[in-house]
Amino acid sequence: MSSIKDIFRPFKKDISSLELPSQFTFPFFYQPDPWTTLASEQLIEELQNAPLIQPLFDSGNPQALACGKMFGVLVVQNPKGDIGFIAGFSGKLGPYTHMDGFVPSVFDLYKEDGFFLQEEQVLNQINAQIDLLEKDTNLIDLQTKLKLIQEQSDLEIEQKKTQLKLLKAHRKQQRISQKELLDPLQYIALEQDLIKQSLRDKHELRVVSENWQQTIQDLKEAITQIQTKIESLKQQRKTKSNALQNKLFSQYQFLNKHGQTKDLLDIFAQTAFKHPPAAAGDCAAPRLLQYAYSHKLHPLAMAEFWYGESPKSEIRKHLHYYPACKGKCEPILNHMLQGLHVMDNPLLQSPSLDKDLEIVYQDDDIIVVNKPHEFLSVPGIYIKDSVYTRIQQMFPNTDSPLIVHRLDMGTSGLLIIAKTKKAHKALQKQFLEKTVHKTYVALLHGIVEPDSGTIALPLTLDIQDRPRQMVCFTNGKPSITKYQVLHKANNTTKILFYPITGRTHQLRMHASHPLGLNCPIIGDDLYGKSKDRLYLHAKKITFTHPSSKTRVSFEVQEDF
């Protein structure tokens, strides 16, 4: 295990001209400051030359990681007053659960004499028993035989029923044909004989059915005996696994600046999750803060960056900075940051208060507005100023829901507002039926090839890091965008997007994802890099007017 001397890194470059941060980084929305930038650059240089680490990210190495890794730096001041930084990574680094020079995990799962490995071995033994029973040739033979017997039973019973149906029809014919030929006593005798035949046939069918049922029941009981053992083992595994997980979560103890400690179970009990998600507590940010508090290092600033290839589902760009994740890290960091003077959450500050809402067109049914960038379509949890609230103030007596569709806060451009319920219903129907045609213009970081095409990637919400989206070919919803390149220069591409579907962050994902254009929209703070604005504009919209029933089109030029 590394000592603090090995983990505390002095800055190699001159820092004498840098002022110390007056507030700690707000980890869920930030721009790296000079200190964390300097620390990250020093760590990146170290990663590129580390003999154990560099091969893990070499695509030519057969042992290389399938994708990159999130690294973090925490600028700290030690008790002597020296300024330096500590570094960490999320989860495991390939085969390494710990690496010299990096902060360790909050709890060492893989300690040789620890409870986790011992109880994991018990679970592995149960898994082996389940696997053995499920692959037991006796069970497979019984299941195969049962299927065959059921097929034979169905066939023979059906054949017997067909035979008896013919005999029944023959008896019916005898009753009809013999009634005129036989005297009453003879006919009664015939009728009694035919009844006996009918009873005999029913008895034979019952015997055949009961014989097959007994055979099938015997096989089912033999199969059930084995399956009951399997289900019992699975229940035992579930009970032990849940107990192990809770025991594990209780070992993850997190400090804050006040010296207060909470474990994962306590932290997540106060959230909507109620229970910690898998791998909670293993991200770089909580590891770094935990180490700092445990070793009397005062945290000054923090940043996390992605190193290596992007995973297939998420968008992570090499050497881009990223905020801490919402699902796993936010509840933990809300506790750990207590006692630090943290920057205000910029997401609580409304950037739209000094912006005007331009009305492009208005009549008795609709309003078409040109929404500025950094302006909400509808009120948020904390920020209320929005297109909805502005229009509601203009028309306080309307009974319409007003908003028909939305644009992301950072996206500028055209929005349709319905002034009446009737217009709202008619316009919503057009969006559902995909008869509203929209054109967006964007400026991308990178050169797009070819100049036109179609992107189709299924998208789903990343529930651990809302509102980020992920590509998921199993459960994702279809999303389709057509595009046409307008201009290329200085490693940027100006492009037109024609969305066929309207998924959340569809254009941003399709632009940035490696399976899409692999060129993020400039200013995209979720899937690319922050800038002065998101360079995405809803340029044109065409739809059927709810009253005149004619096709109308509106267009507003982008300002970039």
Image: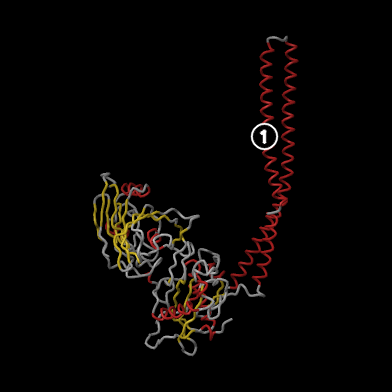
Q: Quadrant of residue 200?
A: top right
Q: What is the residue that sits farthest to the bottom in this orientation?
A: 80
Residue at the image position 75 percent from the left and 11 percent from the top: 185
Q: Quadrant of residue 104?
A: bottom right
Q: Amino acid at mark 1?
A: Leu
Q: How is the image coloured?
A: secondary structure
> Label 1 crowding class (10 Å Cα cut-off): few <14, some 14-19, many 20+?
few
Residue at the image position 72 percent from the left and 37 percent from the top: 212
Relative to 455, say whether 62 is above or below: below
**Quadrant in which the C terminus is drawn:** bottom left
| 541 on left or right of 89 | left
| Nearest to the observer: residue 51 or residue 323 | 51
| Nearest to the observer: residue 113 or residue 373 | 113
Q: Quadrant of residue 35?
A: bottom left
| Nearest to the observer: residue 130 or residue 412 | 130
Query: Count of labels shown?
Result: 1
Q: What is the residue that sits farthest to the front in this orientation?
A: 60
Q: Position of residue 10 (x, y in %)?
A: 47, 86
**Which residue corresponds to mark 1?**
155
| Nearest to the observer: residue 540 or residue 361 | 540
Q: Position of residue 207 (x, y in %)?
A: 75, 33
Relative to 524, say whether 156 is above or below: above
**In what element is the residue under mark 1?**
helix
